[in-house]
Image (cartoon, rainbow, N blue to C red):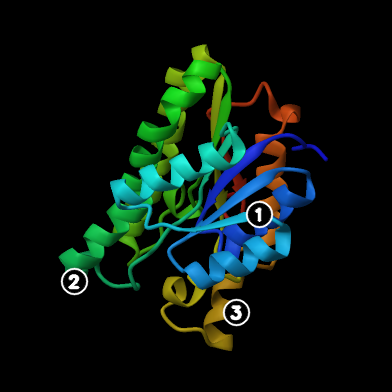
């Protein structure tokens, strides 16, 4: 019960890493707002863990404000924010990625963190307490060809996390990032271009531990970084990648 008495917003929590984090947080005693653009998926996970679901497009300021207000009304305070929602473009030479795909990647992976920080930071500053965890990627540390603009968006997440950590530390607010390698999530096929045994084998060959990141891996790492056990840790981009970035 390392998160007993704490409340958390987890975005993109209807599936994949977000669902794994939401499940772990609930198991450790946290009250969780399960936010996802897919309302049915959010409701399913929320019912499973005893959390509260909400439909939210984190790239829209109006949705973010409604999500944060709902969390504040439901829980009283917001202790933890997990910025997990993310998208990618299909593998392609950088100059062939459409402007629409570029804009979507930047809106969901980058702008959402700005919008949520703008809504939540004043509340945390007033209480001199709070934790942000931004889900980045090994792509932001060791970029792969043909995922250029996705790589860049996750590099931004890492730098933003460190910048937030420095600025918010005097207010008792910690900010960290997690950098998973690809996992068994809805985005896996998009990362690889095609989901075939041959492509999986090729991808796994780049991971020393020989497997993908799992939602459970992410939940465990997130739980530690957001718990009081990590009270002296801020500005870290922790790799949960089986050695991919070595």
Check the image and report above or below for 167 versus 78. above
- Looking at marks 2 and 1 on the same chain, the residue that comes earlier in the sequence is marked by 1
- Residue 177's x, y, as percent? 53, 40
Label 1: how many Cα within 10 Å (few below 14, some 14–19, many 20+) = many
Query: For the view shown, which residue lies furthest in the right direction?
Result: 1
Dot 2: few (<14), some (14–19), or many (≥20) neighbours within 10 Å?
few
Question: Of residues 128 and 145, which is closer to you in this image?
Answer: 128
At 30% from the left edge and 52% from the top edge, which residue is drawn? 60
| Mark 3: secondary structure | helix
Q: Which mark is residue 201?
A: 3
Disc 1 on helix, strand or loop? loop
For the residue pair 121 and 242, the one nearer the viewer reads as 121
Mark before the other along the chain sequence, 3 or 2: 2
Secondary structure under the numbered disc 2 in the rendered image: helix
Q: Is residue 234 above or below residue 133?
A: above
Real-space Cα distance between discs 3 and 1? 37 Å
Give the CA distance from mark 2 to mark 1.
41 Å
Residue highlighted by disc 2: 96
Q: Earlier in the sequence, mark 3 or mark 1?
A: 1
Q: In the rendered structure, find residue 51 and report the number of the disc placed on it.
A: 1
Does residue 214 appear anywhere in the picture? no
Q: Is 13 on the left-hand or right-hand side of 101?
A: right
Residue 14 in percent (x, y) is at 55, 65
Judge depth for marks 2 and 1 and give the one in front.
Answer: 1
Of badges 3 and 2, nearer the viewer stands 2
Between marks 3 and 2, how big is the CA–CA gap?
Answer: 27 Å
Q: Quadrant of residue 178?
A: top right
Asked if residue 87 shows in the view, the reply is yes
Specify the quadrant of the image occupied by residue 184. Answer: bottom right
Q: Badges 3 and 2: C-beta atoms under 8 Å apart? A: no
Quarter of the rendering occupied by the N terminus: top right
């Amino acid at each position: 019960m390392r998160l007993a008495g704490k409340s958390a917003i987890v975005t993109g929590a209807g599936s994949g890493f977000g669902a794994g984090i939401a499940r772990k947080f609930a198991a450790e005693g946290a009250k969780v707002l399960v936010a996802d653009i897919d309302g049915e998926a959010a409701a399913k996970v929320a019912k499973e863990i005893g959390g509260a679901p909400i439909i939210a497009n984190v790239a829209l300021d109006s949705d973010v404000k409604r999500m944060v207000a709902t969390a504040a009304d439901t829980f009283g305070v917001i202790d933890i924010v997990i910025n997990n929602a993310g998208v990618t473009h299909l593998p392609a030479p950088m100059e062939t990625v459409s402007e629409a795909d570029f804009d979507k990647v930047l809106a969901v992976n980058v702008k959402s963190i700005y919008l949520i920080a703008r809504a939540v930071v004043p509340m945390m500053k007033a209480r001199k307490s709070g934790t942000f965890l931004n889900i980045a990627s090994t792509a932001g540390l060791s970029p792969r060809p043909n995922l250029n603009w996705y790589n860049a968006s996750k590099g931004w997440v890492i730098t933003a996390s460190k910048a937030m950590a420095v600025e918010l530390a005097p207010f008792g607010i910690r900010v960290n990032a997690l950098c998973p390698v690809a996992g068994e999530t809805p985005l896996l096929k998009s990362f690889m271009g095609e989901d075939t045994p041959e492509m999986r084998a090729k991808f796994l060959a780049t991971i020393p531990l020989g497997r993908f990141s799992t939602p459970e891996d992410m939940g465990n790492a997130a739980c530690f970084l957001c718990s009081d056990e990590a009270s002296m840790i801020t500005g870290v981009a922790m790799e949960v990648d089986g050695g991919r970035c070595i």
